[in-house]
Amino acid sequence: MTKAKGQQDDEVSRFEWIVAALGAIGFIFIIGYFGREAARGDAPPPMVTVRVDSITASAGGFTAHFEARNTGGSPASAIQLHAELRDDQRLIEASQVRIDYLAAGSMSRGGFFFSHDPRAATLSARATGFLEP
């Protein structure tokens, strides 16, 4: 039987079945993912640690290069990092850095700027706060 111009075959092609199956699999995956996240409840909070890797001299002073890691179970945003140079108990200088976002299990690198040499004093660095994204 011949078809009139513009008339389509009612049979679904193999390609359409494959696309429909992939769409269904993707939909089921998304529903499962969000279901699992909802059932999980409250994840452990972010746990941000800061480690100074190296110190370099520059024209304007010194840079203490750091690595910040979030070993907690939740992401964090607007993370405030604080570093201090101390000579015994006396504060010589402080520096602050903000990290916009740190996913759970991830890390970020950066630097604290100082006008005094951090190698000539005691340098400590830590996270002082975050927001939940």
Image (cartoon, grey):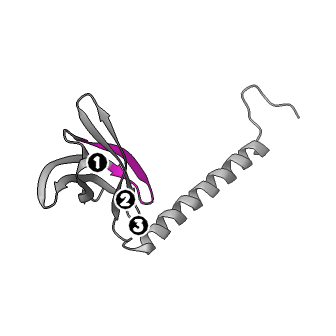
In this view, 27 is above or below 7: below
Residue 119 image label? 1
Q: Residue at x 44, y 73 (%)?
A: 40
Residue 75 image label? 2
Q: Amino acid at mark 3?
A: Gly
Q: Residue at x 30, y 35 (%)?
A: 57
Q: Is residue 37 left or right of residue 102?
A: right
Q: Label 3: few (<14), some or many (≥20) within 10 Å?
A: some
Which quarter of the picture shows residue 128? bottom left
Residues in magenta? 101-113
Q: Given this view, does label 1 or label 2 mark the residue nearer the observer?
A: 1
Position of the N terminus, as image quadrant, is top right
In this view, 64 is above or below 28: above
Looking at the image, can residue 13 be seen?
no
Q: Is residue 22 left or right of residue 58?
A: right
Residue 107: x and y in percent read 42, 52
Return the disc, 1 or 3, that comes first in the chain's sequence.
Answer: 3
Q: Residue at x 19, y 41 (%)?
A: 116
Which residue has dot 3 on it?
A: 73
Q: Is residue 1 left or right of residue 117?
A: right
Q: Label 1: few (<14), some or many (≥20) within 10 Å?
A: few
C-alpha gap between disc 2 and disc 3: 7 Å
Q: Are marks 1 and 3 in contact (CB under 8 Å)?
A: no
